[in-house]
């Protein structure tokens, strides 16, 4: 004979019996009315549920730094910082230490300005190297970055048919601290760095 599910209601309590399971008592009266709620157990089916640690914001991070530099002396041509290129970087994890590494060639750049007295042409070419680290700050991750730009520039001025060249080469360095926010920007004299996260 198959036992059927039965329920009985007695004095505000429900007794539920199911074959092969046994009986359970459920009350429709809340015995905890007016009391503070108690914490629930983290035990579920014999398995202890633990909080999953949050991922470090610097872990598995990569992106580019857009470099804008002032090509040529601004007092001569009045040029504004111009985008030269984007420098790729990766963050490499070693335990709790997150190291930034990257670099690459900058775009070959030529700009000509025309004036009543003649023309002013700037040619720029270079390579960039990125070094630094990624750390936790007050409001999340922070990139502490040093950008070293190995560049060559030539300034050609043509006045009434006479051409003069003013070559330059150097290794300017830019040190910035950028929050891990896409579009974060920092600037100095004649340069701008903009963070683009992947």
Image (cartoon, rainbow, N blue to C red):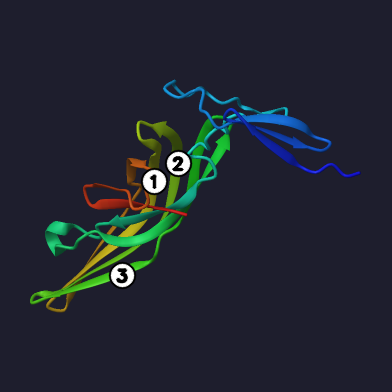
Q: Earlier in the sequence, mark 1 or mark 3?
A: 3
Which residue ends up furthest to the bottom in the rendered image?
A: 161
Q: Residue at x 52, y 28 (%)?
A: 29
Residue where numbered disc 1 is placed: 148
Q: Which mark is residue 131?
A: 2
- Identify the element where label 2 is drawn: strand
**Nearer to me, 71 or 18:** 18
Q: Residues within 10 Å of mark 1 (few under 14, many from 20)?
A: some
Q: Earlier in the sequence, mark 2 or mark 3?
A: 3
Q: Which mark is residue 41?
A: none
Q: Residues within 10 Å of mark 3 (few under 14, many from 20)?
A: some
Q: Residue at x 56, y 37 (%)?
A: 93
Q: Is residue 154 left or right of residue 131?
A: left
Image-quadrant location for residue 34: top left
Image-quadrant location for residue 159: bottom left
Residue where numbered disc 3 is placed: 110
Q: Which quadrant of the rendered structure holds the N terminus? A: top right
Do the numbered discs 1 and 2 sit on residues whose CB atoms are within 8 Å? yes
């Amino acid at each position: 004979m198959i036992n059927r599910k039965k329920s009985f209601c007695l004095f505000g309590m429900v007794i539920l019996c199911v074959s092969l399971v046994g009986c359970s008592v459920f009350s429709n009266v809340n015995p905890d009315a007016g009391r503070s709620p108690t914490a629930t157990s983290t035990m579920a089916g014999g398995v202890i549920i633990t909080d999953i640690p949050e991922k470090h914001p610097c872990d598995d991070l990569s992106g580019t730094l857009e470099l804008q530099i002032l090509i040529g002396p601004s007092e001569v041509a009045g040029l504004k910082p111009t985008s030269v290129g984007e420098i790729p970087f990766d963050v490499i994890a070693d335990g709790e230490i997150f190291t930034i590494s990257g670099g690459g060639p900058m775009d070959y750049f030529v700009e000509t300005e025309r004036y009543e007295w003649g023309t002013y042409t700037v040619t720029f070419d270079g390579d960039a190297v990125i070094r630094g680290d990624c750390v936790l700050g007050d409001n999340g991750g922070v990139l502490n970055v040093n950008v070293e730009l190995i560049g060559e520039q030539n300034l050609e001025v043509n006045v009434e048919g006479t051409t003069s060249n003013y070559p330059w080469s150097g290794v300017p360095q830019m040190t910035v601290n950028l929050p891990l926010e896409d579009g974060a920007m920092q600037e100095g004299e004649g340069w701008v760095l903009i963070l683009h996260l992947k």
